[in-house]
Image (cartoon, helix red, strand yellow):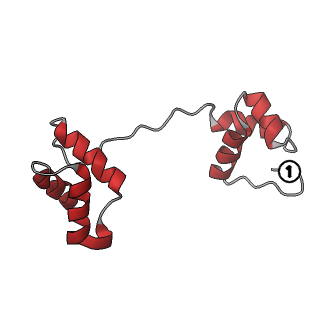
């Protein structure tokens, strides 16, 4: 991965992103990142950003703490995801993801 970025940096001086991608495919076959990734690296190098390491990606902040969800379930373990979502003021899918991450499975109407 790191090596391919260095090769991309080397080839950038004489080619455009599409030509560079084709050249990488000829050289490395299926081990090449997608064309969109090559274009992104090409753009970064053209903007004089020559670092080849991955950038840190921050996680979005949680909309609520798991303890809030656990407290609601302690009060009433029969609540649906929709009811929990309303109580926490979030989307139902957010509640579903947190429940799954917490290892909570609904069995016979109880969490």
Q: Quadrant of residue 107?
A: bottom right
Residue 1 in view (yes/no):
no
Residue found at x 61% / y 31%: 63
Residue found at x 30% / y 45%: 40
Q: Is residue 39 left or right of residue 7?
A: right
Residue 33 percent across, percent down from the top left: 32, 60
Q: Quadrant of residue 35?
A: bottom left
Q: Is residue 56 left or right of residue 75?
A: left
Residue 110 in view (yes/no):
yes
Q: Quadrant of residue 49?
A: top left
Q: Residues within 10 Å of mark 1 (few under 14, many from 20)?
A: few
15 versus 57 height, above or below: below
Q: Secondary structure at mark 1?
A: loop
In the rendered picture of this protein, how many numbered marks are placed on residues?
1
Question: The N terminus lies in which quarter of the figure?
Answer: bottom left
Residue found at x 36% / y 58%: 34
Foreground residue, 60 or 24? Answer: 24
Q: Is residue 70 left or right of residue 14?
A: right
Foreground residue, 106 or 23? Answer: 23
Residue 13 percent across, percent down from the top left: 10, 48
Residue 71 percent across, percent down from the top left: 75, 35
Residue 82 percent across, percent down from the top left: 81, 38
Q: Is residue 12 left or right of residue 37?
A: left
- Name the residue tied to disc 1: 110
Foreground residue, 1 or 84? Answer: 1
């Amino acid at each position: 991965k790191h090596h391919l970025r260095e090769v991309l940096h080397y080839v950038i001086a004489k080619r455009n992103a599409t030509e560079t991608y084709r050249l990488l495919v000829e050289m490395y076959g299926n081990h090449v990142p997608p064309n969109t990734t090559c274009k992104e690296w090409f753009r970064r190098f053209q903007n004089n950003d020559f670092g080849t390491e991955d950038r840190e990606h921050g996680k979005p902040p949680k909309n609520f703490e798991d303890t809030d969800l656990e407290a609601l379930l302690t009060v009433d373990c029969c609540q649906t995801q929709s009811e929990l979502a309303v109580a926490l003021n979030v989307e139902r899918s957010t509640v579903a993801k947190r429940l799954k991450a917490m290892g909570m499975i609904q069995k016979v109407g109880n969490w």
